[in-house]
Each structure stands twice: as structure tokens, then as C-alpha cells.
């Protein structure tokens, strides 16, 4: 698969696995158990117990927890999705203007928006 061969994709997977490991106890309490590949597997009996005891409701409502960590990571990806892509961008600056500000300095994504590529 293409995603597995790219270093940046591996970086995203690594970041998500790190978040999963950080909240492994919370996830396990709710019946979500990470396997050796990093995928979450559901233990149906534990999920039922967690739902009856209110653990899932607490898990979803917790302000500082797994959900907020995933949301934060998704916000980061939405603000600059190019950080997890192995792409080279070549720019040809317009040197005829007196001052040329490179829109790609802050991020590739903002530069592409500036140049109407996205």
C-alpha cells in the first residue's frame, strides 16, 4: 500500500499509536483494546459492562482525555495536512516584483492556498 511506504504516513501512524498507548487504560476500561498493529479491537462484553457502569459516558465527556487528544491531532492535520505527505514542492518566484514573500515558508499548505492550488 502507498501509505505504508511513505515516511510521513508512518509518522502519522506513529503519532496516533502514541496517543492510543497514552490512553490505553481508559480505552481498556471501555472495552477498546489496541492490538499489536495499533488497531482498536472491541471486547463486546467489556463494552456492555462499561456502558452499564457509565464508563463510556465519562470517557466521551472527559475534557482532557483520549477524545480531546485525537481532536487536537485532527485539528493539527486540518490546519496543515501537508506535514504527513512526502511531496516536494518547487516554486518559481516572481523576481520581477520588488519584494517577493515566499508563501511556502510557514507551511506548504498555506502556500498552496495562497497560489490557488487547493
Image (cartoon, rainbow, N blue to C red):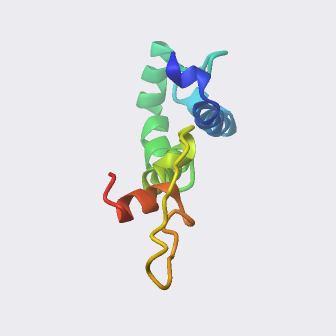
Residue occupying image coordinates x 52% and y 49%: 89
List the single residue furthest toward the bottom: 98
Asked which quadrant contains residue 16, the reply is top right
Which residue occupies 56% across, 55% down?
Answer: 64
Where does residue 104 sit, x and y in percent of width and height?
Answer: 52, 62
Asked if one can make out residue 49 in the rendered structure from this viewpoint, the answer is yes
Asked if 106 appears above or below 16 in the picture, the reply is below
Res. 60 image quadrant: top left
Give left or right: position of 18 versus 60.
right
Which one is in front, 79 or 54? Answer: 79
Q: Is residue 5 above or below residue 19?
A: above
In the displayed structure, 111 sits above or below 73; it is below
Viewer-closest of 8 and 71: 8
Front-lying residue, 52 or 80: 80
Q: Please give the name of the residue rendered at 55% of the width and 44% of the height, measured from the top-left corner.
A: 88
**Could you say where residue 45 lies in the image, as x and y percent from the top left?**
47, 14
Asked if residue 84 lies left or right of residue 112, the reply is right
Relative height, residue 34 to residue 79 (above, below): above
Position in image of residue 111 (x %, y %) = 45, 61
Number of numbered markers: 0
- From the top left corner, tell me how far across and down residue 48 is, in percent: 43, 21
Residue 32 can be seen in this image: no
Residue at image position (37%, 65%) is 114
Amino acid at each position: 500500500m502507498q501509505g505504508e511506504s511513505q515516511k510521513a504516513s508512518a509518522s502519522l501512524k506513529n503519532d496516533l499509536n502514541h496517543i492510543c498507548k497514552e490512553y490505553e487504560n481508559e480505552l481498556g476500561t471501555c472495552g477498546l483494546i489496541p492490538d499489536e498493529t495499533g488497531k482498536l479491537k472491541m471486547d463486546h462484553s467489556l463494552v456492555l459492562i462499561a456502558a452499564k457502569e457509565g464508563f463510556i459516558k465519562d470517557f466521551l465527556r472527559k475534557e482532557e482525555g483520549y477524545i480531546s487528544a485525537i481532536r487536537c491531532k485532527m485539528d493539527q492535520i486540518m490546519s496543515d495536512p501537508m506535514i504527513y505527505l512526502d511531496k516536494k514542492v518547487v516554486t518559481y518566484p516572481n523576481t520581477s516584483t520588488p519584494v517577493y514573500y515566499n508563501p511556502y515558508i510557514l507551511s506548504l499548505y498555506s502556500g498552496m492556498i495562497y497560489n490557488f492550488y487547493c
